[in-house]
Image (spheres, rainbow, N blue to C red):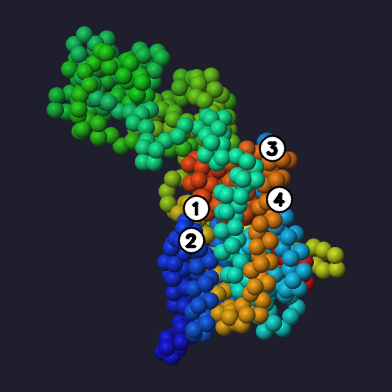
């Protein structure tokens, strides 16, 4: 044990990774459908290790990991955060604001009644509202207080203690309310109500692992018969002879030779042609007149699917039919979808393409490469990350957070580097939704930033809190737990009544919205499981972004209110 203690003191990074590793292992264990999850398990593992051995933790390392997490979460929720404020989304935005605000008011009232210090108070808020990032913003705010260093470290340790005590009921309580208590209070059956809402939304259920066999675009090989009307015609003339369909001859087998034809290549009887087109046209136009054959070598054609962002005057302002008729580079490319401001539009010949539209196209790779610069910009689908934007955005957030403060009563409340970085990530994520080639960071990388960043941060918090955990637990453990029960339940029940009777939201979607406002993904999953329907996800997607932003900032706010 002495050797282990000496090793962890000399190499503290090993203690951090050990805590995260144990958190990953134990966070997946389930008991009656409930699991602690990676973040809480990493915190508890850090506390456990910290009670056994001393692991020195660098404040700079903690801040770096937390800022990576905050940028990642802002980046991921940015598009939905702003989109959900438009149109009928105001009702969901109202719910997403109402629940966290009630949670803050409840937490403030409870801790004032219990006369808890600012550290325990912030931990009750983060644990009971199950928003671990609030633990980080609260510790940053505490570090900024005009207090002796040892007192600040004690308060930061109290944050971790209270968060660990309250988090379990903070999650279980929301799950219980959403799946059991809420249906009884509002007198509806989850499964029956979910079926009703699915019917209203036009949702058709599909079984897991089952997908449609229909492929809208395909390549097929046909042998040209002697009496075919295309015999003796050029490839261009043959393609243009079919007025109501876009079919393209991409390859021709003539004897043992495979040709890549030009528009002037003449089709001969007995040729086998590889044709690209929409499946229904291939079947309707060529099926009755030509014999389809199996020819793997002929059909070994590189196919690409791109999303193209329209910026070109050659494309913008024209109908789809005009683009087909006038843009030579459109030959050999088929349109799969058209998106405008994140909404899918129907595809019709008279639809006018506008700047900022996204064209989802498929075709032979060489044809796609020719069309992309004519349309505008190709939206990258590679796995590289724009680390320049990520780094500079975090720097900007830190500078803004350090510089901006505003008076609240007799005190000046600083924005804080963590909240500012969260908001910067939010803006970058929103900008990417408007200009898809900007600040490309793959979803897998964003998930890593969010998971590893927060897990390592809370593990380091736990390592520092370990030495005083049990003494603090004896000091105020029962008060913290029962206070946390109120902080968890009151926002959920208030949101339920507000959403049902004031906002008139559909019940199952409302439950998903409450889970989102509390950022308890497990509660949304539990509602899905109990209802046998994915419809709760709709409400969750509206409010989760707002919940993450507000609840994270509450860590800073609760410290300011209590000091």
Find the distance from the CA under tag 4 to the CA under tag 2.
26 Å
Per the model, the C-alpha gap separating discs 3 and 1 is 38 Å
Name the spot of residue 319 as percent of width and height, x first: 53, 22
Mark 1 nearby-residue class (10 Å; few <14, some 14–19, many ≥20):
many
Q: CA distance from mark 4 to mark 3?
A: 14 Å
The residue beneath circle 1 is 441
Q: Are marks 4 and 1 in contact (CB under 8 Å)?
A: no
* Residues packed near mark 4 inside 10 Å, few (<14), some (14 to 19) or many (20 plus): some
The residue depicted at 36 percent of the width and 21 percent of the height is 280
Q: Secondary structure at mark 2?
A: loop
Number of the label disc, if any, that sits on residue 504: 3
Q: CA distance from mark 1 to mark 2?
A: 29 Å
Query: Are the residues tagged 3 and 1 within 8 Å (C-beta)?
Result: no
Place of residue 341 in the rendered image (x, y in percent of width and height, measured from the top left): 59, 36
**Disc 2 crowd, CA 10 A, few/some/many (<14, 14-19, 20+):** some
Q: Earlier in the sequence, mark 4 or mark 3?
A: 4
In this rendering, would 53 be left or right of 107?
A: left
User: Which circle marks residue 35 in the picture?
Assistant: 2
- Identify the image quadrant of residue 312: top right
For the N terminus, give its image quadrant: bottom left
x and y percent of residue 491 in the render? 69, 54
Please report whichever mark, 1 or 2, sits nearer to the chain's N-terminal start: 2
């Amino acid at each position: 044990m002495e050797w282990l203690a000496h090793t962890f003191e000399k190499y503290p990074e090993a203690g951090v990774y050990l805590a995260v590793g144990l958190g990953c292992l134990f966070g997946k264990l389930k008991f009656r459908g409930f699991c602690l999850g990676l973040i809480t398990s990493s915190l508890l593992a850090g506390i456990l290790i910290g009670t056994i051995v001393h692991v020195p933790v660098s404040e700079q390392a903690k801040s770096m990991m937390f800022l990576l997490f905050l940028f990642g979460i802002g980046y991921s929720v940015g598009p939905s955060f702003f989109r959900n404020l438009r149109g009928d989304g105001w009702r969901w935005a109202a719910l997403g604001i109402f629940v966290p605000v009630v949670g803050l008011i409840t937490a403030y009232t409870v801790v004032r009644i219990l006369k808890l210090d600012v550290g325990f108070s912030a931990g009750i808020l983060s644990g009971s509202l199950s928003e671990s990032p609030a633990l980080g913003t609260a510790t940053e705010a505490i570090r900024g207080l005009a207090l002796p260093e040892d007192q600040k470290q004690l308060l930061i340790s109290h944050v971790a203690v209270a968060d660990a005590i309250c988090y379990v009921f903070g999650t279980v309580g929301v799950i219980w309310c959403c799946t059991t208590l809420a249906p009884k209070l509002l007198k509806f059956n989850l499964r029956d109500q979910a079926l009703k809402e699915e019917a209203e939304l036009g949702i058709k259920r599909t079984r897991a692992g089952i997908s449609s066999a229909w492929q809208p675009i395909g390549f097929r090989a046909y042998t040209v018969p002697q009496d075919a009307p295309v015999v003796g015609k050029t490839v261009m003339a043959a393609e243009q002879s079919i007025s109501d369909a876009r079919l393209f001859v991409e390859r021709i087998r003539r004897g043992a030779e495979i040709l890549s034809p030009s528009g002037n290549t003449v089709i001969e009887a007995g040729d086998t042609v590889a044709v690209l087109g929409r499946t229904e046209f291939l079947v309707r136009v060529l099926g009755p007149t030509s014999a389809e054959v199996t020819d793997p070598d002929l059909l070994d054609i590189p196919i690409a699917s791109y999303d193209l962002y329209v910026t070109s005057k050659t494309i913008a302002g024209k109908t789809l039919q005009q683009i087909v008729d006038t843009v030579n580079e459109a030959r050999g490319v088929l349109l799969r979808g058209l998106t405008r401001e994140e909404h899918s539009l129907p595809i019709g010949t008279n639809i006018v393409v506008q700047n900022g539209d996204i064209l989802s196209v498929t075709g032979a790779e060489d044809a796609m490469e020719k069309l992309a610069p004519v349309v505008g910009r190709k939206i990258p689908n590679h796995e590289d990350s724009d680390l320049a934007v990520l780094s500079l955005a975090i720097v900007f957030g830190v500078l803004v957070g350090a510089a901006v403060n505003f008076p609240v009563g007799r005190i000046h409340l600083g924005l804080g580097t963590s909240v500012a970085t969260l908001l910067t990530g939010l803006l970058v994520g929103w900008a990417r939704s408007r200009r898809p080639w900007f600040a490309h960071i793959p979803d897998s990388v964003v998930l890593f930033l969010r998971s590893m960043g927060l897990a390592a941060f809370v593990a380091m918090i736990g390592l520092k809190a370990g030495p005083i955990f049990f003494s603090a637990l004896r000091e105020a453990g029962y008060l913290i737990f029962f206070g946390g029960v109120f902080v968890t339940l009151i926002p959920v029940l208030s949101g339920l009544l507000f959403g049902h009777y004031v906002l008139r939201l559909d019940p199952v979607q409302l439950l998903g919205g409450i889970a989102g406002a509390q950022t308890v993904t497990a509660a949304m999953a539990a509602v899905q499981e109990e209802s046998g329907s994915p419809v709760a996800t709709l409400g969750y997607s509206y409010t989760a972004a707002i919940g993450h932003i507000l609840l994270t900032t509450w860590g800073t706010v609760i410290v300011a209110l209590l000091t």
